[in-house]
Each structure stands twice: as C-alpha cells, then as structure tokens.
C-alpha cells in the first residue's frame, strides 16, 4: 500500500514532508518514514517537553506567598485560628473577577459557609468554614498560588 500511495503522489519534497507531518498529527503517530526513489525520510516526534514548562511559572507565585505563610504562622493572637489550604492551587475570593467576594475581613461566618475557591487542575474546589467565627484577616491575595497547609484566613472562633 505505501508504494502505491507514493507512486500516486506528485509534488516537491517539501510537499511530501508536509504530508508526512500531517500523518503524524492525524493518526497520533510518534514516527513515520517514507522512501521516494533514492531519498529516505523519517520524522519522529519527541516526548512533549512543553508539559513541565507550564508548571515553572507557577513556582514563583508560590514562592512569593511563602513569606506571607511564615508571617501568618507567627501572627495569630491567642484564641485565633487559621484556616489552611487543603491543596496546592490558585486562591480565588469570588466566583468571578467582578463578583463580590465570599467573605471580607470582619464578616461573621457559619459552619459550612464557603470562604473561597482553590482552583487545582482546572477544578474549582470550594473551601468551607469548619465552625462559626469572625474573619480577622485574609492572608492571601486573590489570584495567587497557594501551597498545601498555607494559612488562608485568620479567624476568631465564636462559641
């Protein structure tokens, strides 16, 4: 079959290379080879190195939030508790950029109330209050990357 296909195709060598490249994409192949008269060609796809690249830009924002994490750990007054990130992701205070935030400093919260969203791997995870209290301080800026265990809110528990 390849011989018939090659014989039926006419065009410049560049046209033939483009056709081979299209076959790689069309069928999801990792390699393809062909021979025309005395010319042999092999196109190979290397494993996708761009995959690690998107995670590299995420590291600097996480590092930028690290000082806030150490400050927050030292800052809680007696009787205050922190609500920590249960996962690595991006912290959002509201459902959309123009929407009102879930909570503001000074707000009273109830058990099970949504406080923020952490986006992880394109999934929006709602973070809920574990008990009643009052938001004393929001420790993370909207849209920044957070680490697992990083304090997000400083809360004064209500009894």
Image (tube, rainbow, N blue to C red):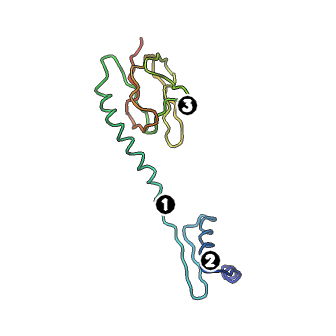
The one nearer the camera, 154 or 33, is 154
Q: Nearer the viewer, mark 3 or mark 2?
A: 3
Closest to the observer, 110 or 91: 91
In the rendering, which numbered label is found on residue 98? 3
Residue sitting nearer the eye, 6 or 95: 95
Sequence-first tag of 3 and 2: 2
Q: Nearer the viewer, residue 57 or 111?
A: 57
Q: Is residue 135 left or right of residue 6?
A: left
Instruction: Name the residue beneath numbered marker 2.
Output: 16
Q: Residues within 10 Å of mark 2 (few under 14, many from 20)?
A: some
Marks 1 and 3 sit apart, C-alpha to C-alpha, by 36 Å
Q: Measure the alpha-carbon separation of dots 3 and 2.
A: 51 Å
Q: Secondary structure at mark 2?
A: helix
Front position among marks 1 and 3 = 3
User: Which quadrant: the N terminus?
Assistant: bottom right
Residue 45 against residue 7 in the figure, above or below: above
* Residues tagged 1 and 2 counted as in contact (Cβ below 8 A): no
């Amino acid at each position: 079959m390849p011989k018939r296909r090659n014989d039926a195709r006419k065009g410049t060598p560049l046209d033939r290379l483009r056709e081979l490249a299209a076959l790689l994409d069309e069928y999801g192949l990792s390699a393809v080879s062909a021979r025309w008269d005395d010319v042999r060609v092999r196109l190979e796809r290397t494993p996708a190195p761009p995959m690690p690249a998107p995670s590299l830009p995420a590291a600097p924002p996480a590092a930028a939030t690290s000082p806030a994490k150490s400050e927050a750990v030292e800052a809680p007054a007696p009787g205050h508790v922190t609500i920590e990130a249960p996962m690595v992701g991006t912290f959002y205070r509201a459902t959309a950029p123009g929407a009102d935030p879930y909570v503001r400093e000074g707000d009273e919260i109830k058990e099970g109330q949504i406080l923020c969203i952490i986006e992880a791997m394109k999934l929006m995870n709602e973070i809920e209050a574990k008990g009643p209290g009052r938001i004393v301080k929001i420790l993370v800026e909207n849209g920044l990357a957070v680490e697992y265990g990083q304090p997000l809110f400083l809360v004064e528990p209500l009894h």
